[in-house]
Amino acid sequence: MSDPADDPSDDDARSWAVDAGDQAATQVLGGAGELATLREFLGYMRDGVIRKALDVSDDAGGRAGVPSGTSIAWVVTHLAASERFWFCGLAVDDWAAVSTPPPGRPISAMVADYRDAITEADTILDCWDDLDRVLARPPGSELRATARWILQHMITETARHAGHADILREQIDGSVGR
């Protein structure tokens, strides 16, 4: 019986076949483990949001692009609060209040605060070594989830809002792409 990787009629098998010697020389996506892979996805989404907020005027960044009131400034402010809530234990009683951009605050300051929140969150993530560990968020609350769930939630939350930022930025100045 022949190896399916040698069968020229089976393009999928050939394109995905990896020689054991090639693995050592080629980086494998996800090869650093689950936690590292999840953190890479979160970092990619965070970077996308920041890139969409850069070089936007304060007026344009604060302008709602949809009837719900979502703006790039709102996305950045909301995600900074989310990072601090899910990873750092910030207690939030009113999400609308913590997600509302402060009046007159430049978008560059909001991006700097988001970057600070990411640094704070990454300091906590650097201590995580067990994704099955159950955590209370914020500490002392009744809300409990595994570290894996929290990390996956923040990936999806950030990706969702990165998509909003993509659309808002395109409405502002036509900028598309990452």
Image: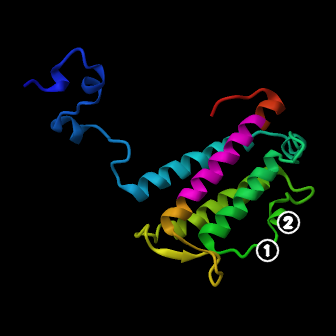
Q: Residue at x 18, y 18 (%)?
A: 7
The picture places residue 141, in percent across and down from the top left corner, at 66, 81
Above or below, 34 relative to 56: below
Question: Would you identify the image quadrant in which residue 97 lies?
Answer: bottom right
99 displayed left or right of 8: right
Say whether residue 50 is visible. Answer: no
Label 1 sits on residue: 93
The picture places residue 94, in percent across and down from the top left corner, at 82, 70
The reply to whether the magenta stretch includes residue 7 is: no
- Label number found at residue 176: none
Image quadrant in which the N terminus is located: top left
Outermost residue on the top side: it is 9
The picture places residue 104, in percent across and down from the top left corner, at 92, 55
Label 2 close to label 1 by CB (< 8 Å): yes
- Label number found at residue 97: 2
Relative depth, front residue between 132 and 75: 132
What is the CA distance from the residue labelled 2 to the residue labelled 1? 9 Å
Above or below, 145 relative to 49: below
Give the magenta-colored segment's residue range: 152-167
